[in-house]
Image: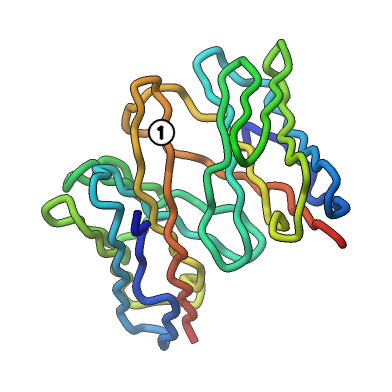
Amino acid sequence: DTGVSQDPRHKITKRGQNVTFRCDPISEHNRLYWYRQTLGQGPEFLTYFQNEAQLEKSRLLSDRFSAERPKGSFSTLEIQRTEQGDSAMYLCASSSLFGTGHEKLFFGSGTQLSVL
Amino acid sequence: DAKTTQPPSMDCAEGRAANLPCNHSTISGNEYVYWYRQIHSQGPQYIIHGLKNNETNEMASLIITEDRKSSTLILPHATLRDTAVYYCIVRPRGNNAGNMLTFGGGTRLMVKP
């Protein structure tokens, strides 16, 4: 079990630059989630994929944010024209589904973004 | 729209049981109670979940009241490594799109030597 992998762990960028984060889920998981977490708060849902289809997007996901999951494997989250308010931890999770209706999420360690 | 209420922080002595409460008075009959925890600088980690019966696994026990309006997560012998933020979450049973986990503020548990 290699777990969910996120890259990079830390990213420092200047305001106005574009950044891209990568998430590699657990290989047999077909669901993938992106969350954002600011200091002292719980994670907030951003978007969700079932295989390669993006099925849900939060209102938090402005048009500067775009996520993809080509071929239903790894996923990328891009932020264009970064703003200081984008500074946060970006978490990725993939999930196992059970016949009981239970879904167990496995989270990566996140990418910490700092926008200067 | 938080569906759960948890105390913001708790302390526990190492080796003692940690009992973390959660109120979910508006829970519906088809919603699970989930507990996740987040250790500093890591992503959240699944602990346990339940519907209406008490549950136990290698990490913890979950006690759900008969009316399902509250629950308690029990760490039987807390260690320093259990220091973390603990999140109680209710989520509809079923694997439909949109049943994502909604995190609140959680309880910051500090285990002290």
In this rendered view, identify the residue nearer to me: B5 or B10. Answer: B10
Q: Is residue A61 left or right of residue B71?
A: left
In percent of the image, x 44 and y 60: which residue is there? A91
**Residue sitting farthest toward the left:** A71
Residue located beneath label 1 in the image: A103
| Residue in the image at 50% along x and 51% along y | A44
Q: Is mark 1 on a helix, strand or loop?
A: strand
> Residue at the location (14% across, 56% down)?
A70
**The quadrant where residue A62 appears:** bottom left
Which one is in front, A83 or A40? Answer: A40
Please give the chain letter of the residue carrying mark 1.
A
Q: Which amino acid does label 1 sit on?
A: Glu
Q: Can residue B1 be seen in this view?
A: no
Which residue is painted at 73% across and 17% down in the image? B65
Vertical position of residue B42 compared to residue A42: above or below: below
Residue B28 at x, y percent in the picture: 57, 16
Tell me: residue B19, above or below residue A65: above
Camera sees residue B87 = yes
Task: Give residue B51's position: percent from left, percent from top.
Answer: 56, 19
Spot occupied by residue A113 in the image (x, y as percentages of width and height) = 46, 76
Relative to A75, is B40 on the left or the right?
right
A64 w.r.t. A82: above or below: above
Which image quadrant is residue B70 in? top right
